[in-house]
Amino acid sequence: MPAPPTKLRRVFDLDSLSGVLVALASPVTRDGAIDEAATARLVDHVLAGGVQGVLALGSTGETASLDEPSRRRLLAAVVKAAGGNVPVFCGVAQPQLSVARAEIEAAARLGADAALVAPPFYYPTDQAGVLGFFRQVAEGSALPIFVYNIPQFTKVTVEPATLASLAHEGTVQGIKDSSRDFEYFEAVCMATRDLPAFRVFTGSDTMLLASLAVGGAGTICGAANIAPALVVRIYDEYRRGDLAAARRSQDELYELVMAVRDGVFPLAIKAALQMLGVCEPWSAPPVRALDDQAQTRLRERMTRLSLLRD
């Protein structure tokens, strides 16, 4: 296991965290090993784009396909590269309670600032089960807990009333909602609006501008791996009240998101990062890459969006 960081880390005020956070890809080599040098390049790339934080080991980071030693190496590399300049969230997608708690403890030792925790999955559960899981995960946790709502992967929705109960009792400090369900997102904002410190982030890049309009804090998204400055620009334009500019930028982001949905997720994001010279195109094991035809389409669309030169 990598050694924890030795230098004193900055303590972040997560109660006021807003803006753009990146759901980082996990660079690996062709043999499936964590590419620490490429991870550092990726973090440098997104920080240069002005993002306010990073998430390691989310869905874009292929956490479910990485073994425990790889998860530890990846997180340690991200924490080192971030250098205390922005908060580092660590994704936890473990349906077994003790394993989820162990993942959070390991993330804290390695220097993460918060844990983004998916609800228990595989076996069907009800909202009472979701409440019990998060309450027990949070009990004695070394890190603040954020809920990860992504029902297309977990087949479990953390209902707004359930989330509001967890938020009002102080069990969880925020949510990343990747459901792509705007009515759900709006319901979450309404259910927690009396808690200004509760952070509501969209994980759906295409919904960023709309989510800000109903009270969202920002986004934790995958497209910001590729074009962090574009995503930050949407947030900044909205905050200064330039809605026409924000809509134009959101249109650009929509085009990029559609481009990287080609093929098996998240191979197009890895391919785009290779085109930008950040990392190799390989997925976590079982290793594969985006097919040639899809790469050609992606390159054409990224060139059209001025993300690549002709």
Image: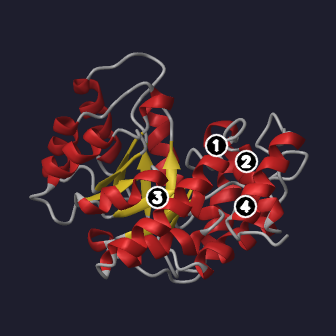
- Secondary structure beneath dot 3 equals strand
Q: Which residue is mark 4?
A: 302
Query: Which amino acid type corresponds to the residue marked 2 in the rendered image?
Result: Ala
- Secondary structure beneath dot 4 equals helix
Residue 131 pos. (x, y %): 24, 33
The residue most toward the top is 124
Q: Residues within 10 Å of mark 2 (few under 14, many from 20)?
A: many
N-term mark: 1 or 3: 3
- Secondary structure beneath dot 2 equals helix
N-term mark: 1 or 4: 1
N-term mark: 3 or 2: 3
- Secondary structure beneath dot 1 equals loop
Q: Can you say whether 158 is above or below 254 in the image?
A: above
Residue 201 pos. (x, y %): 36, 56
Mark 1 against mark 3, which lies toward the viewer?
1
Give the Cα separation between the discs numbered 1 and 4.
13 Å
Q: Which quadrant holds residue 285? A: top right
Residues at circles 1 and 2 in contact by the CB criterion of under 8 Å:
yes
Q: Residues within 10 Å of mark 4 (few under 14, many from 20)?
A: many
Q: Which residue is mark 1?
A: 261
Which of 265 and 23 lies nearest the eye of the viewer? 265
Q: Which residue is mark 2?
A: 268
Mark 1 against mark 4, which lies toward the viewer?
4
Q: Can you say whether 120 is above or below 206 in the image?
A: above
Q: Can you say whether 295 is above or below 233 in the image?
A: above
Query: Which amino acid type corresponds to the residue marked 3 in the rendered image?
Result: Ile
Q: Which residue is mark 3?
A: 220
Q: Residues within 10 Å of mark 1 (few under 14, many from 20)?
A: some
Residues at circles 1 and 3 in contact by the CB criterion of under 8 Å:
no
